[in-house]
Amino acid sequence: MKATKYYQNRVETAIEFIADTLANGETPNLERCSRVAGLSKYHFHRVFKLVTGETLQQTVSRIKLSIAAHQLAKERISITEAAMNAGFESSQSLAKALKREVSVTATQLKNEPDRLTQAIAFFSLPNPEKTAVGLIALELTSLDPFQYIAIPTKGAYPELNQVYHQLFNSVGDPNEVRAILGIPDCNAGQLNGPGALFDCGLLLENGWTPKDKSIVDKQFSGGQFIRVRHNGAFEGLDETLDEAYRNILTQELVSLADSQCLFHYLDDPEEVIAQNLRTDIYIPIQLLN
């Protein structure tokens, strides 16, 4: 199964923009790429990776190396000039990147045309149709908008027990808690990436106001969602999330909506063993006519 042409075309537009931006000596960022591609900023990175097989940063690095390789093919261009023209800070930066990716030096590429031709082919843009899609049960559902309390974290996932304890302690009465929530940053390479944002949240009975200054009131927008049930330890959520996205990308009549994902933790990990934990994942979508 392959991602629909809709998403392939969007990602290809982003790749073209990345290449043009780098060729002009600028560095593209996620926000600009998502805007040019016409994809939601909440989902762009994960969609990009699932369609191309690379993260945005890996694609940027590959295109820079491709530009450098083409520059090295020009007789009058020095290695330092090739590096600078491709957006590397120095010839040493280019040397490290080449060593990491193809285990050769710029001098070897400059002096050996056959090896340079192979490197240019290797650094060509990835095939956007190469990513396989697994099978997973998807359920169409809807949620009304709701308000919740949260403690925002950065790079802390999955070590969040103390954060949730803080939330529960601030509430006092567990009967006031209607649901335990997590609002992930789906644009992170992984949920536990160093820059990954994650809101630890609780949905409460009406009328409760947080007193802890580190706790904030937030609004979750409602709408239509694809719901996927994850069974097992929280460490496997990222894999299930990827699998759900892969399947959504194959649906001709569904596109990702411009809002955030939601984790609904159905079990308390202090009461249920890891292998029996259940988490419902909500991915926002819109139905196409």
Image (cartoon, rainbow, N blue to C red):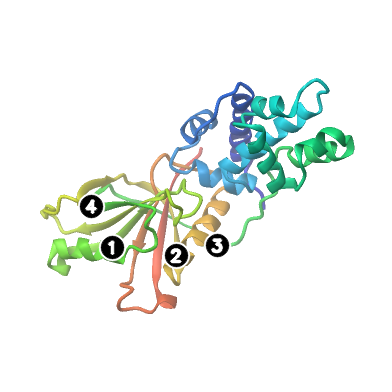
Q: Earlier in the sequence, mark 2 or mark 4?
A: 4
**Residue, disc 4:** 148
User: Does the rendering let one see residue 149?
Assistant: yes
Q: Earlier in the sequence, mark 1 or mark 2?
A: 1
Local SS, label 1: strand
Q: Residue at x 54, y 29 (%)?
A: 27
**Residue, disc 2:** 229
The quarter holding residue 140 reads: bottom left
Q: Is residue 103 above or below residue 205?
A: above
Local SS, label 3: loop
Q: Earlier in the sequence, mark 3 or mark 4?
A: 3
**Residue, disc 3:** 136
Report the front residue among 270 and 178.
Answer: 270
Question: Mark 2 to mark 3: distance in Å?
Answer: 9 Å
Evaluate if marks 2 and 3 touch, with contact meaning CB atoms under 8 Å apart.
Answer: no
Q: Earlier in the sequence, mark 4 or mark 1?
A: 4
Q: Is residue 66 above or below residue 172?
A: above
Q: Where is residue 203 shown, x and y percent of the image?
A: 23, 57
**Residue, disc 1:** 180
Q: Residue at x 45, y 38 (%)?
A: 41
Identified by mark 3, the residue type is Ile
Report the front residue among 230 and 154.
Answer: 154
Q: Where is residue 67 shown, x and y percent of the image?
A: 71, 30
Alpha-carbon neighbours of circle 2 within 10 Å: few (<14), some, or many (≥20)? many
Please name which of the two marks, 3 or 4, marks the residue nearer to the observer.
Answer: 4
Local SS, label 4: strand
